Image (cartoon, grey):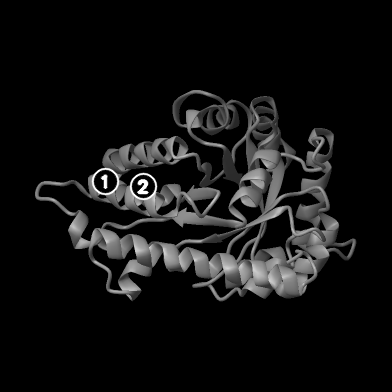
Amino acid sequence: MTFTRRLQQAIEEKNNPTVMGLDPKPEYVPSFLIEEGMTDGEKIFAFNRHLIDAAKDLIPAVKPQLAYYEALGLDGIKAFHETIRYAKEKGLIVIVDGKRNDIGSTADQYATAYLTDTGFAAYADALTVNPYLGSDGIKPFLEAAAANGKGLFVLVRTSNPSAIDLLDLELKDGRAFYEAVADLVKAWGEPFVGDDGYSPLGAVIGATWPEQADALRMRLPQTFVLVPGYGAQGGSAEDAARLFDKEGKGAIVNASRSLMLAWQKANADSPDAFAEATHMAIVKMRDDLNQALTMAGKKRV
């Protein structure tokens, strides 16, 4: 089964197009999880494990951001490996947020690490990649993903405010740079479109740019969209809904701090209270997204 079919099926089974970002810092860990002598990596894995346990029946996927684990060195990398293995054991899809990019044999090695069946790739389902080396930097990842039933999400229109410094530059043919990137993503992915109508080459498009969202969704009809920017970054459910196709499919919305730190907002520093606070935050996001999709005419009640 293709990655996009597995992802869409998981979204429909949970009735929830949410991916929980796992971007942990040691200071995010509640005191009830901390034991004497624990390393920062051990604290982070304990935190992630409790988040996954609270979320596994409600969400289809998690998205660990590699920077937060790499910052802790080998201890953090071990926590990352244990986290993605645990998530897979609990039946969740794992999207690794690494924004990797290179060419030739180096790109092959990145692809081997995350898009085959060895190393981290044994527990990873998809990887975020950077397109700014052109097709030489995408082809090795795309071929590995297609061969192994994995997925990619290419940076097209990121959620950060300074994205305009580069992505809004106007080209000689009148297109904005991000529109040219979207057109390349469509062209690169077309030979790999599966019977579900989607390519394994997805796109990252932020919910913080609603004025571009509708046009990009039309520009990328066979592209699954990973949507950052919801919640803490200012994107609304209505903004995110623009990036789903007309049937309310083909997109998944990320939230990190609003879900990871729900326990802080609720002052829930105990196992049961932590789980309840996380559960409530996920349900609120799920209901907000589904209501927005319904109001947009993309989802039946």
Label 2: state its secondary structure: helix
Name the outermost residue toward the front. 301
Mark on residue 69? 2
Nearer the N terminus, badge 2 or badge 1?
Answer: 1
Would you identify the image quadrant in which residue 145 lies? top right
Q: Seen in the image, is 271 located left or right of residue 172?
A: left
- On screen, residue 76 above or below 159: above
* Residue 162 in view, yes or no: no
Q: x, y percentage for residue 211?
A: 76, 75
Q: x, y percentage for residue 177?
A: 76, 61
Q: Residues within 10 Å of mark 1 (few under 14, many from 20)?
A: many
Q: What amino acid is found at the position of numbered circle 1 in the picture? A: Gly
State the residue position of label 1.
Answer: 41
Mark on residue 18? none
* Residue under the image location 74 percent in, 38 percent down: 135
Q: What amino acid is found at the position of numbered circle 2 in the picture? A: Tyr
Q: Seen in the image, is 244 located left or right of residue 44?
A: right
* Residue under the image location 41 percent in, 35 percent down: 85
Closer to us: 267 or 126: 267
Q: x, y percentage for residue 208?
A: 63, 72
Q: x, y percentage for residue 57?
A: 48, 50
- On screen, residue 190 above or below 215: above
Numbered-mark total: 2
